[in-house]
Amino acid sequence: MILIPILLLLVAEVADVQAASGLVFPQSNCKIKCLNGGMCAFSFENPAIHSCICLMGVYEGDRCQYQVGDDPAKRKKIEQEAEEQRRIEEARARERQALDAQRQREHEWRRNEEAQAVERQRQIESRNQQDEELRRQEQQRVQPSNGGFDVSPAEKARQIEMKRREEEIRRYEAERKRIEGERAAELAQRAKAEEQRREMEREYQRQRQQQEEEAQDEQRRQDDEMRRNDARQKEEQQRQQQEQLQREREQNTREEPASNGIQKADDSELKEEDMEPDSPSEYWDYKSNEAEKPKEEEEYWKEKSDTDESAGAGWDQTSVSENVDEEVASETTTQEAEHVEPKDPMTKLIEEAARKTAEEHDIVLTEDDDDHSDDYWDHSPPRRDDQVKDSTNIVDPEDDYHEEASKSDDDDSKDDNKREEEKADGWMMEERDKEPDSSSSLHYICLLATTFYILF
């Protein structure tokens, strides 16, 4: 199914080309080698010119050696491979031509040898005829004119036969020596030709191996060059990134002291403003305070005794001390927030694992924002009884002053006792009530389980 569209494209391309050319049949008679399924075609104007028809939209090139969309580097590599293949084919063609020429010479030499052998045989037959004629003439010469014989005919025949045999033996030996010499020369020539052929084969193998080694060396050199270029580019990128990070770090380092100086200056100004003592008239000038009070309150406080005035003064002092303590605590918290030490990577990993475990098991983790959540002592300011009542019950500002006056005596006595206890022990050393916290215990268990899971 996949080949059908490809064949249709090829047929369409062939149909377009057939207007001016035709397909070579069989394809093995093509004068060029078409790659990647290309078909060989010839021109009607000049049938000796062959070309390749490539699959439209897939391959291109004079021999369909390029794929459409290939990068120039890949095409260059294909051209180099094609050039190398062409050199190898040319070397093989030269070798085949040399072998064909050698075979042709051997064939010519054999044909000449056969012609020479036929000529020698003809010469031998001609000499035999001449010898026979000489024997006949010699026989006629030795025969007397009167028909008589000086010697017996048998003796003459025996002598003639002996001479003929000796002559024949001499000719046979001469012929044998000549044939043996020719045969030895032929064997030597054949051995020489075989040695030359083997030498040419060895030379071809050596050249081919050398070409392959050169191609491999060139490929390795190109690969090494590409790796070096890649490494050089990576090093350059890393160097640029490091320089960028260094510049950013230096810029942050230059900006941080300035920002810290500005922040510290602002903080110092704020602290000076916060720590600026109020005018004594706000806390200790009772006359000015009484002057600012409403008329009804002024009449009410005139009826109060000296004890009430001392209790009010103690309350003002306590309020001032509480305000000062709160300002000191806020300054300490701000300084600690400015100098927060970075967490350890293992601690971050454990906290992240605990958070993921809590999310997976739908566990709500409670985080205490107090910096002294794990301390032994209670750092919260002391709370008065009237403050506890105020936190639980909202007091209406329109309450009757007489109800407040009725409770003032008890509050004053309790305040005096509280201040005496604070002077004796100090409210900063009050021990916190440690209540079991189920969420913190579950948090600790989750941390342990996650740590063991990660480690093992």
Image (spheres, rainbow, N blue to C red):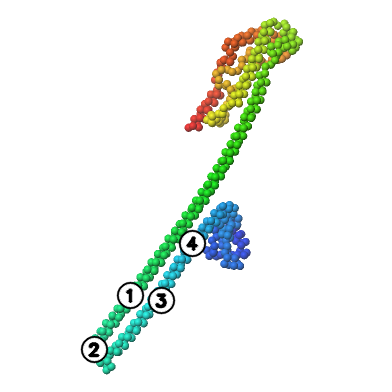
Mark 3 and mark 2: Cα distance apart in space:
47 Å
**Under tag 3, what secondary structure?**
helix
Instruction: Judge whether residue 383 can be spotted in this image.
Output: yes
Mark 1 and mark 3: Cα distance apart in space:
18 Å
* Label disc, if present, on residue 176 of the rendered structure: 1
Q: Position of residue 70 (x, y in %)?
A: 58, 53
Task: For marks 3 and 4, give the one nearer the viewer.
Answer: 4
Q: Classify residue 15 as left or right of residue 304.
A: left
**Under tag 1, what secondary structure?**
helix
Q: Amino acid type of disc 2?
A: Val
Q: Which residue is mark 3?
A: 115
First in sequence: mark 3 or mark 2?
Answer: 3
Q: Position of residue 417 (x, y in %)?
A: 61, 9
* Residue at image point 33% right, 74% down: 177
Mark 4 and mark 1: Cα distance apart in space:
45 Å
Residue with the most extreme right position: 295
Q: Which residue is mark 2?
A: 151
First in sequence: mark 1 or mark 3?
Answer: 3
User: Is the C-beta separation of discs 2 and 1 under 8 Å?
Assistant: no
First in sequence: mark 2 or mark 1?
Answer: 2
* Residue at image point 69% right, 16% down: 278
**Under tag 4, what secondary structure?**
helix
Q: Position of residue 252 (x, y in %)?
A: 61, 33
Q: Could you classify mark 1 by the number of other residues whose Cα lies within 10 Å: few (under 14), some (14-19), or many (20 or more)?
A: few
Q: Amino acid type of disc 3?
A: Ala
First in sequence: mark 2 or mark 4?
Answer: 4
Q: Amino acid type of disc 1?
A: Arg
First in sequence: mark 4 or mark 1?
Answer: 4
* Label disc, if present, on residue 91 of the rendered structure: 4
